[in-house]
Image (cartoon, rainbow, N blue to C red):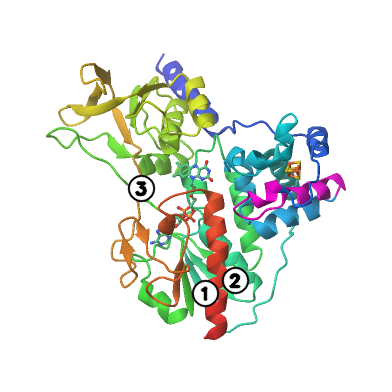
Amino acid sequence: MWYNFAFKLLAKGYVMTFKYLELRDSKYDERMAAEEAARCLLCVDAPCAKACPSATNPEQFISAMRAGDISAAAKIIRDSNVCGGACSLVCPADKLCEGACVRTAMDRPVAIRKLQQFVVEQEQALQLQVLDKTPVIHAAKVACIGAGPASLTVAAKLAQAGYQVDIYEAMPQAGGMMSYGIPPVRLNQELVDWDVKTVTDLGVKIKLNTKVGVDISLAQLEEQYKAIFIGVGLWSGRTAQLGERNLSGVISAVDFLVAARGSQGKDVVIPKSVAVIGAGDTGMDCAATAKLLGAENVTVFCRGAKVPAYHEELKFVQSLGINVATQFSPQQFLGDDAVHGIIAQHADGYSELKLKAELVIYAIGQNIDAGEAFAGVAIEGNKIITQDFQTSKAHIFAAGDATNGGSTVVQAVKEAKLAASAMLKFLAEE
Ligand SMILES: Cc1cc2nc3c(=O)[nH]c(=O)nc-3n(C[C@H](O)[C@H](O)[C@H](O)COP(=O)(O)OP(=O)(O)OC[C@H]3O[C@@H](n4cnc5c(N)ncnc54)[C@H](O)[C@@H]3O)c2cc1C
Ligand code: SF4
C-alpha cells in the first residue's frame, strides 16, 4: 500500500533526523561529577588554568563544585568565557587544560571538560544568572557584526562596562558556527542558546536576519555607533569543478552544514552515495552529517598519508562505517548535468579509484564573506588586517575567525576579550 511506503519513508526520515540531532557524548550525573571532581589535586598555580586560552581556572571551579557551590563554579567559568557551555563540548581539551593536567603522570587527566559541562547544565537547569549586570552609564553605543563567539564575548564585556551594545546577525539564529557549523551530534542547540542567553541577559540586543552590507550598511552603523566590532567569521565555502562541465551536486562544506543544521536536518536531500573532499575536522563533520542523515556510502578523500582531523573525530566517522581514502586525490567528476561519480588517483601515480557519488562536498577551507560590505576596512586574502585588534579604520575592531583565518571557539573568545579591552581603551580616550 502506498501509505505503508510513505509511512516507512517518514519513519526513516524521523529516525535519521533523531540520530543527527542526538548528542553523542555521555554526561555525568551528580555522583559521577562528585567522584571526578574529587580526583583533582587542586594544584597551586594550576597548569590546567595556564593552558586555557580563555583563562578559565579549572582548579577554582572544581573547588567551588566540591564545596557544593554550583553558582560560584558557573560564575568562574562564565566570567572567563561566555561560551563556556559550547566549549564544554567542543574544546580540544586534550591539547589544552586536560593535556596540562598534573594527574596525567599518575593515572589519567581530570575530565575537566565534562566537569565544566556538568556545571553549565546545572546552571541552566537552575536558571542561574551568574554574570554581574551593569546599567548603561555611557552615551556612546557599540555595534557588533555577527553573533558568533567573538561578538558575543565582546558584547558581554562592553555591556558589563556600562555600554549599550547591539549585535547585527545575518542568520535567523545567534551563535555563529556553534549554531550552524558544528553538527548537533557534537554540540546541542540548547546549550548554545543558553550561552547566548547569558549575553542577552546583560542587556545586549541581537538583531537577527540583518546582514551588514545587505540589510544595513557599514556607513549607517558608523553614524549611530562610536565603536564597531567585526566578528563575521569565515562563511564563504570553497568549491571547484573537476572536468569541463559545471555539474550540480557539488557544494561547499559550509553550505552543506548550514543547510543541514539550519533546518534540523529536514531540508537536505541526502543521496545514497556521498564523497567528501578534504579530511580535516570540517570534512569529518560533513561525512558524519551525511551518514547520520541517511547516506549509505560516504567516502572521505585525503590527499596525504596522515589524516589531519582530530583523532576523536576520525574515530567517530570510522565508527559510523565511513571510508577514509588516504593518499587519493580526486581528478575528475563524472556526470552530464549532475555529478554521479568521481575518479581519484593514488599518490603512487598508478592506482585509481572510481566511485559513485551523487553529492560531492568540498571541505577545503572557507573565506571571509565580505564583498563590498566592509569597504574601507583592509582585508588581505582570508583575513581582516588588524593591529592590536584595531582595523585600518580606528573605530572599527575585529577578532575571531575573520582575523585568525579559522581556529576554535575558545581562541575566538580569547582574542575577543583582548579586542574588548582595546575597544574600552579607545572609547575612554574618545
Ligand atoms: C564544521 C566546523 C566544525 C568546527 N568544530 C569546532 C570544534 O569542534 N571546536 C571548536 O572549538 N571550534 C570548532 N569550529 C570552529 C569554531 O566554530 C569557530 O572558530 C568559531 O565559531 C569562530 O567564531 P567567530 O565568532 O569568529 O565566527 P563565527 O562563529 O563564524 O560567527 C560569525 C557570525 O557572523 C555572522 N555574519 C557573517 N557575515 C555577516 C554580516 N555581513 N552581517 C551580519 N552578520 C554576519 C554569521 O552569520 C555568524 O553568525 C568549527 C567550525 C566549523 C565550520
Ligand atoms: S592540573 Fe589537574 S589536578 Fe591540578 S588543578 Fe588542574 S585539573 Fe586539578
The three-letter code of the residue at mark 3 reads Gln
Ligand 2 quadrant assignment: top right
**Residue under label 3:** 366
From the image, state whether disc 1 or disc 3 is nearer to you.
Answer: 3
**Residue under label 1:** 142
The boundaries of the magenta stretch are 47-68
Q: CA distance from mark 2 to mark 1?
A: 8 Å
Task: State the residue at coordinates (79%, 50%).
Answer: 44
Task: State the residue at coordinates (61%, 37%).
Answer: 94
Q: Is residue 284 left or right of residue 154?
A: left
Front position in the image: 391 or 335? 391
Of the numbered discs 2 and 1, the one sitting upstream in the chain is 1
The three-letter code of the residue at mark 2 reads Leu
Q: Find out if the beta carbon at label 3 lies less than 8 Å from the nearest ligand 1 atom.
A: yes
**Residue under label 2:** 158
Q: Percent position (x, y) of residue 343? A: 22, 23
Task: State the residue at coordinates (47%, 57%).
Answer: 400
Q: Name, please, the residue furthest toward the front.
A: 105
Look at the picture and state if 297 lies above or below 336. above
